[in-house]
Image (spheres, grey):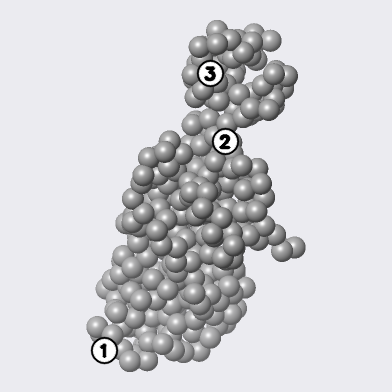
């Protein structure tokens, strides 16, 4: 048992003697310390003492649209690690093919007296007015990371999509590309809308009047990226900017099916800098989100709310970084546009 106590003590950041005092429900122990020890017991799968089985650190829901896009698990991993250090129990909630949505998860989390919710790449706007009203009435701590919908008066942490598009278009135009396509997520998806606004401003500033025909909205999948890329190739684009790495990989696959070389005939840029994008063929030029800094900011905001402090509801924007690799190159010779 001593080995178990030392494991729990090390994880909770306390002494073995403190763990023993918590297990025997001794007085004079701060609630935060008790919560940290009980959380450590849960993490290691040890049974709580009978007198403490009905007490636990607050649950925190992590609501994600899916686990297929590698950037969502990357955010979740960092947020979960930070929450556990604060003696909070994360609960992963992701939409499923059989229809379990944000609304279902919000209802389940509220029934469990959840201590807060972090929405990653999603939001509570789709949950309906009743759930939104309940969340407001309970003043439940909430933070949104890269929210899919507009959610005002709520703490939000986002990557600056406009800066990202400006970086990519500057890179592509410097290599001679003029006819640049844009592949986005569904209409109404806020990060996609912000990318579109920056793209439109760039095109209008350069006097390109036909830019609308070079924009494609689709589902965030390789199939969606391939379908959109096929249409844009017919429009004669020499480069494509994609709203996710998954879309970019679909675009590259579609280009190859048509006998085109990337980047010799077509340059492709992704977004997120997901895991393994540096070892794809070719390595993908993409925009890196500062997920560590964004995750830390989101958890800090959530903890302030849980502690009863007022937090700013302004949107906090983080600058991305363009990572140039092998999927972009000069405009093909002989292209007269």
Estimate the x, y position of residue 198 in percent, counting from the top left.
Answer: 33, 74
Q: Which of the two labelled residues, at mark 2 and mark 3, occupies the earlier sequence position?
A: 3
SS assignment at label 1: loop
* Numbered tag placed on residue 29 in the rendering: none
Say left or right for 82 vs 318.
Answer: right
SS assignment at label 2: loop
Q: Residues within 10 Å of mark 1 (few under 14, many from 20)?
A: few
Residue at 55% across / 11% down in the picture? 27
Q: Is residue 21 above or below residue 298?
A: above
Q: Nearer the viewer, residue 78 or 29?
A: 29
Estimate the x, y position of residue 196 in percent, counting from the top left.
Answer: 39, 76
Name the quadrant containing residue 213: bottom left
Most extreme residue toward the right is: 98
In the image, which is nearer the foreground, mark 1 or mark 2?
2
Q: Which of the two labelled residues, at mark 1 and mark 2, occupies the earlier sequence position?
A: 2
Say left or right for 21 vs 13.
Answer: right
Residue 6 seen in the figure = no
Q: Are the residues tagged 1 and 2 within 8 Å (C-beta)? A: no
Q: Which of the two labelled residues, at mark 3 and mark 1, occupies the earlier sequence position?
A: 3
* Numbered tag placed on residue 207 in the rendering: 1
């Amino acid at each position: 048992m001593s080995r178990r106590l030392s494991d729990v003590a090390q994880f909770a950041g306390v002494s073995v003697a403190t763990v023993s005092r918590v297990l025997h429900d001794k007085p004079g122990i701060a609630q935060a310390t008790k919560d940290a020890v009980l959380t450590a017991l849960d993490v290691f799968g040890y049974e709580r003492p009978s007198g403490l089985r009905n007490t636990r650190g607050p649950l925190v829901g992590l609501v994600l649209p899916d686990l297929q896009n590698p950037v969502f698990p990357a955010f979740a991993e960092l947020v979960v690690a930070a929450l556990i250090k604060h003696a909070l129990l994360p609960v992963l909630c992701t939409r499923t093919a059989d229809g379990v949505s944000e609304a279902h998860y919000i209802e389940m989390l509220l029934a469990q007296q959840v201590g807060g919710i972090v929405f990653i790449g999603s939001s509570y706007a789709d949950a309906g007015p009743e759930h939104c009203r309940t969340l407001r009435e309970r003043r439940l701590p909430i933070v949104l990371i890269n929210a899919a919908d507009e959610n005002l008066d709520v703490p939000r942490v986002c990557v600056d999509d406009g800066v990202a598009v400006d970086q990519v278009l500057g890179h592509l135009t410097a290599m001679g590309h003029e006819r640049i396509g844009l592949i986005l997520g569904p209409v109404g998806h806020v990060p996609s809308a912000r990318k579109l606004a920056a793209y439109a401003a760039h095109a209008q500033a350069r006097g390109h009047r036909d830019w609308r025909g070079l924009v494609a909205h689709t589902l965030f999948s390789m199939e969606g990226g391939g379908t959109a890329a096929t249409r844009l190739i017919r429009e004669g684009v020499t480069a494509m900017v994609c709203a996710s790495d998954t879309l970019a990989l679909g675009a590259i696959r579609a280009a190859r099916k048509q006998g085109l070389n990337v980047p010799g005939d077509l340059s492709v840029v992704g977004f997120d800098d997901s895991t393994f994008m540096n070892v794809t063929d070719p390595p993908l030029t993409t925009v890196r989100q500062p997920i560590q800094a964004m995750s830390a900011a989101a958890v800090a905001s959530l903890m302030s709310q849980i502690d009863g402090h007022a937090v700013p509801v302004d949107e906090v924007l983080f600058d991305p970084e363009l990572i140039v690799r092998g999927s972009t190159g000069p405009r093909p010779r002989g292209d007269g546009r």
